[in-house]
Image (cartoon, rainbow, N blue to C red):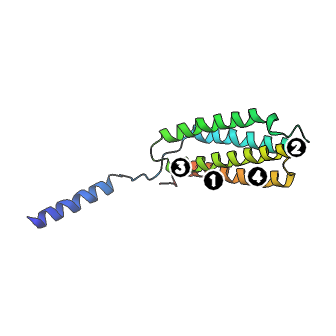
Amino acid sequence: MKELLRILSKCIVVIMLLSGCTIQFVSKYDDQTDTNVTALQKKFDTYFINLKSEAYPACSYSNHISFYNDAKIQLSGIQVRAKAIPLNDITIKQLESLSLAISDLEKSQQLKDKESSCINPLLIDTDQIMFNSIFTAILKLEIAKKRGEAK
C-alpha cells in the first residue's frame, strides 16, 4: 500500500511538471507602471536640467513646491497601483526608495533656501544620476517581467 502511494505521488508530481504549471515569484509586467515611471523620470530630468540653470531666488524651494507636490501625487498613484498587484513586493520597495529620495531632495532644497542659495550644480548632477539609477532599476524589473525573465 505504501509503495502504491509513493508511485501515485510521483505520478502526480510528474503530471504537474508536464502540464506546464509554473511558479510565479514576482508579479506580471504592468504597462501602466512602465509608462508612469517613465513619465516621472522625464519630469525629474527636466527639473534637474532647469534647476542647474537657475539663480536664486528662481531656484528656491518656494518656486518649486508645485513640482514636488505633482511628483508626490504621481508617485502615490504608481505606488497605489503597485500595491494592488499581487507579488509586487520588489517594485513596491523600489518605489519606497524613490519616495525617500524625493523627500531628501526636497529637504536639501529647503535647507538651501535658509542660506538664500541654490543647490550646487555638481550636486544636482549627482542627484540626477542617483534618481536615474532608481528609475532604471524599476524599469529594468518591469521589462524583465515583460520578457518573462523575472519568474
Comes first in the chain, label 4 or label 1: 4
Name the residue: 71% across, 43% down: 41
Q: Looking at the image, is mark 1 or mark 3 nearer the viewer?
A: 1
Q: Looking at the image, is mark 2 or mark 4 nearer the viewer?
A: 2
- The spot of residue 74 in percent (x, y) is 64, 35
When the figure is inspected, residue 118 is found, relative to residue 62, above or below; the finding is below
Say which amino acid is labelled 4: Asp
Per the image, the residue denoted by label 3 is 145
Per the image, the residue denoted by label 4 is 127
Comes first in the chain, label 2 or label 4: 2
Q: Looking at the image, is mark 4 or mark 3 nearer the viewer?
A: 4
When the figure is inspected, residue 118 is found, relative to residue 6, above or below; the finding is above
Res 125 label: none
Label 3 Cα neighbours within 10 Å, binned few <14 / some 14-19 / many ≥20: some
**Left or right: 129 with respect to 146?**
right
Per the image, the residue denoted by label 1 is 137
Looking at this view, name the residue that lies furthest to the right.
55
Question: Is the residue under label 3 in contact with that under label 4 (CB below 8 Å)?
Answer: no
**How far apart in space, not on screen, are marks 1 and 3 (Cα)?**
12 Å
Quadrant the N terminus occupies: bottom left
Say which amino acid is labelled 2: Ser
**Left or right: 53 with respect to 99?**
right
Name the residue: 61% across, 42% down: 34
Where disc 2 sits, the SS reads loop
Where disc 1 sits, the SS reads helix
User: Closest to the observer: 47 or 101?
Assistant: 101
Per the image, the residue denoted by label 2 is 116
**How far apart in space, not on screen, are marks 2 and 4 (Cα)?**
20 Å
- The spot of residue 33 in percent (x, y) is 59, 40
